[in-house]
Image: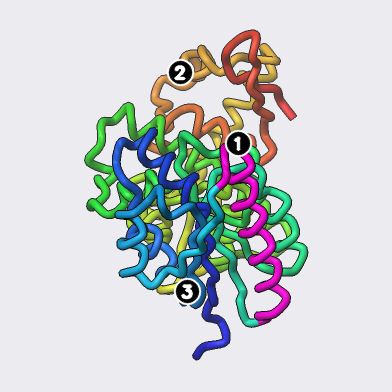
């Protein structure tokens, strides 16, 4: 067994998952998408699900076929029963963390914020924590606490082939890719600020997950992170060297791109703080041929954010104006 292989313990707050899938997705909970996602991350050696199984007779058969240990909770009424299941799961997880040092990753299947202290404690014990929950019934407090958080809804969708990004509607491409480009570029810029010329793609992915635990390239139409990076490299947003765990770097600014960003800085200086809307028209008054897409950007906002990452302007969301506002740096 390779030392680098993740060894995973899976704990399911089954009532939370099953009710969330039923009420939000209008379908029974299926463990298969979760199992597939875990198989991509390592070897699952512990599988436990906690519930009053008299409420989930069919589910019990499904879980048994997938070698899940069913932990029966004593029947009680209302919140007392729910609290007992939460406490039992938390105690078992902490006990396992101390008794099984070889377990590197704990997967908590729940959307309940009551498990946030458990996540913190497991991370204090140097364990990686992955959360899994139904998007509409997951507390906003839980995903940021985890090293990675997977929404069950998206895992189910992943079982169908994703629609390639290039085949989607142009407006949708812009809206979906702008934040994606900014996330990748800003994260890569931060990693390169230490003086290195490039970083491993695996390092970039781990850092992105620390910033955005719910990040998943499949949500943007890519089957793997490497495929996403190759698409960005095709648009000259990043540069790749090597195969597999490739080295990723930012391309040197071309003359046209440099001139365009300097022009943006000059336009912003003339009327700062300047709202984003209208800036492109002002730039075209001075440079009629300006088009951010020819420079490899999906939209003007993406271009402006790239200029911000290079320190030429600053950009912030202004709630009263309902628009991004740029200032010269």
Relative to 161, 50 lies left or right: right
Residue underneath mark 1: 140
- Tag shown at residue 44: 3
Frontmost of labels 2 and 1 is: 1
Residues 158 and 29: in front is: 29
Which comes before the other along the chain, label 3 or label 2? 3
Q: Residue furthest bottom?
A: 1
Residue 188 appears in the rendering: no
Q: Where residue 40 sits: x, y (%)? A: 41, 68
In the image, is residue 91 part of the stretch drawn in magenta?
Answer: yes
* Vertical placement of residue 93 versus 305, above or below: below
Mark 2 element type: helix
Q: Residue at x 50, y 34 (%)?
A: 302
Image quadrant assignment for residue 206: bottom right
Q: Where residue 32 sits: x, y (%)? A: 33, 60
Disc 1/disc 3 C-alpha distance (Å): 27 Å
Which comes before the other along the chain, label 1 or label 3? 3
Residue underneath mark 2: 284
Mark 3: few, some, or many residues within 10 Å (few <14, many ≥20)? some
Q: Which segment is the magenta one?
A: 76-101
């Amino acid at each position: 067994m390779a030392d680098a292989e993740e060894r995973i313990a899976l704990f399911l707050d089954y009532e939370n998952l099953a009710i969330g899938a039923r009420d939000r997705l209008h379908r029974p909970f299926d463990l298969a998408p979760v199992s597939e996602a875990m198989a991509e991350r390592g070897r699952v050696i512990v599988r436990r699900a906690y519930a009053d199984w008299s409420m989930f007779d069919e589910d019990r058969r499904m879980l048994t076929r997938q070698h899940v240990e069913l932990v029966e909770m004593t029947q009680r009424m209302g919140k007392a029963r729910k609290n007992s299941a939460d406490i039992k799961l938390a105690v078992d997880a902490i006990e396992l963390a101390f008794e099984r040092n070889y377990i590197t990753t704990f997967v908590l299947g729940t959307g309940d914020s009551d498990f946030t202290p458990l996540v913190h404690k497991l991370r204090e014990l140097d364990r990686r924590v992955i959360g899994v929950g139904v998007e509409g019934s997951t507390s906003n407090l839980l995903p940021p606490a985890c090293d990675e958080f997977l929404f069950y809804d998206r895992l189910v969708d992943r079982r169908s082939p994703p629609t390639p990004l290039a085949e989607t509607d142009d407006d949708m491409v812009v809206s979906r890719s702008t934040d994606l480009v900014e996330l990748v570029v800003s994260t890569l810029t931060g990693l390169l600020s230490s003086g290195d010329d490039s970083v491993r793609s695996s390092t970039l992915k781990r850092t992105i997950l620390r910033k955005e635990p719910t990040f998943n390239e499949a949500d943007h139409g890519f089957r793997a992170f490497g495929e996403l990076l190759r698409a960005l490299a095709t648009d000259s947003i990043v540069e790749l060297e090597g195969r597999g765990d490739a080295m990723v770097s930012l391309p040197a600014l071309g003359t046209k791109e440099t001139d365009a960003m300097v022009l943006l800085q000059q336009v912003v200086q003339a009327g700062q703080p300047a709202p984003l809307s209208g800036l492109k028209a002002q730039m075209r008054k001075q440079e009629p041929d300006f088009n951010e897409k020819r420079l490899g950007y999906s939209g003007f906002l993406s271009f402006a954010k790239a200029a911000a990452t290079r320190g030429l302007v600053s950009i912030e969301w202004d709630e009263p104006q309902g628009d991004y506002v740029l200032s010269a740096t």
